[in-house]
Amino acid sequence: MFTLFLIFILTSIIFWLLFLKSPTTTKTISAWRWLLFGWGGLISVTVLTPIVFDRMFIDVTTIFYCMLWIAIFCISDEIFFRYKKNNVIITKPNDIHEYFVITCLYIATCTGFAYLLMVKGFDILQMAINDPYALGTVRDNLVFGERATFEPIAVFLATAGLPAAGLHAIKCIEKNKKLKPIILFPLVSYLLIYVFNAGRQGFLISGLTFMILIFCAMQIHNFHYKYKHHIRYLGVCATITFLIYYTIIVNFRTVGDVGHFDWKIQHQNDIYKCDIDLDFLNSVYKYGNIGNIFVEFIYYFSPQLYGLSHIFPHDFREFGFGAVQFPYVARRLMPFIGHDIVTEIEDEIENVFYADGMFHHFFRTAVDNTIQDYGKIGGLLYMTLLGAMCGLVRYQTIYKKDMTSVFLISLCCCGAFFTIIYSPFAELGFGFPLIWILLTKIYLTMCKRTK
């Protein structure tokens, strides 16, 4: 437990330095600060981890490249935020246009929600309730089984729930109104995808995005928002709900047919060729299922940089050029591409790890994804472009204060933090809401009058 305490202290110090020391709106919505916070936490786990890897090591070359990868994004973000293009004033669209797009997003959400729930949802939930250990089977069936269960269009529609709820919340804060209970519906629709998947990423994306956009909206629209206590209450309820869900997932989804957590520990030790400190295990075991969450956390984040360093020297035969980060798009274009480039790259990675007797199926940060798509040099150019875009969106948010920019920069900050796992664009719970908010922004931009 002392290891976890040190990790918590270090990440808290990093968070304080980046956000709480002389706090400002600009700091809250700086994507590069969220990137540094995420990577600071990841490095803390990597340095203090009680896990020892026998066949993976972190070399200096990988460390230097990661530092360069991070630095380029941060510098590009800050430069383009400070660069003022012109002084053209663009008026806000009428409220009727903003409420119209929010209504359209609600309608899309309802359509996707109805399909997912009525076609397969009740059967899946009943299976999960009757046998919690079947969650792993449910996930396999949905992700790797019959794709008809998860029609892409239904998923796309359901993910409109995140921008629908986010934009609605921003309007409530702007008008100094209490957050409506109906906001929970699109969020539930969005998270339903992950509940059926027995996944967790959607909870991180929605939770972090919502936290940032609410703080941002209160700071730029209504600093004296009179329902702050209501938001605190909702935040506490949401956190408790997530912890309950996460505890269930950790203890029942991936514990194998034997149904106990010791099997999972031994399984991960075998596939990663590693060992975990027994004193650490004994210190968390006394907390029962809650202690298993700490063990899961350590196993989840400890191999990231080790795995990246292991695959870093490999030269890929062919780059994905976006296919790795947008697999849900690439698979639809496969008939035009002529081959499955995503699977071919995954096979290359699998062969590298299998050659050393290890399993490759764990995350190696977004650095790995950008290299697979564009190579080492191309990945740095790609991060320069992303940093520039985040800086420009932050500038729009601060000086134009439109609701789509508030949501978009919040999503960007969440994506920057998410890079410690893998590229956020590869997660449909991030990519699809990004498409929705860009379409919304285009429509509302067309409704504005330039003076």
Image (cartoon, grey):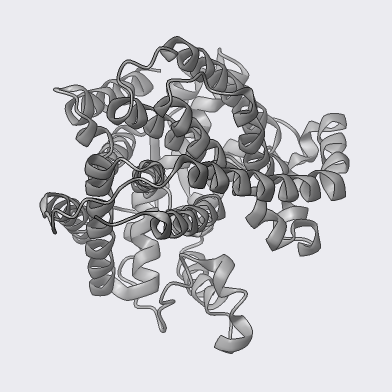
- The answer to whether residue 298 is left or right of residue 262 is left
Where is residue 246 shown, x and y percent of the image?
60, 29
Residue 119 versus residue 34 in the image, above or below: below
Point 50% across, 47% down: residue: 97
Where is residue 308 shown, x and y percent of the image?
35, 58
Residue 306 versus residue 33 in the image, above or below: below
Q: Quadrant of the C terminus?
A: bottom left
- The answer to whether residue 256 is left or right of residue 68 is right
Q: How many marks?
A: 0
Where is residue 397 shown, x and y percent of the image?
28, 43
Can residue 364 be seen from the camera position used here?
no
Where is residue 51 shown, x and y percent of the image?
40, 37
Residue 338 versus residue 176 in the image, above or below: below
Point 13% across, 53% down: residue: 87
Q: Quadrant of the N terminus?
A: top left
Quarter assignment of residue 392: bottom left
Residue 61 versus residue 211 in the image, above or below: below
Can residue 268 be seen from the camera position used here?
yes
Q: Nearer the viewer, residue 118 or 427?
A: 118
Point 34% across, 35% down: residue: 45
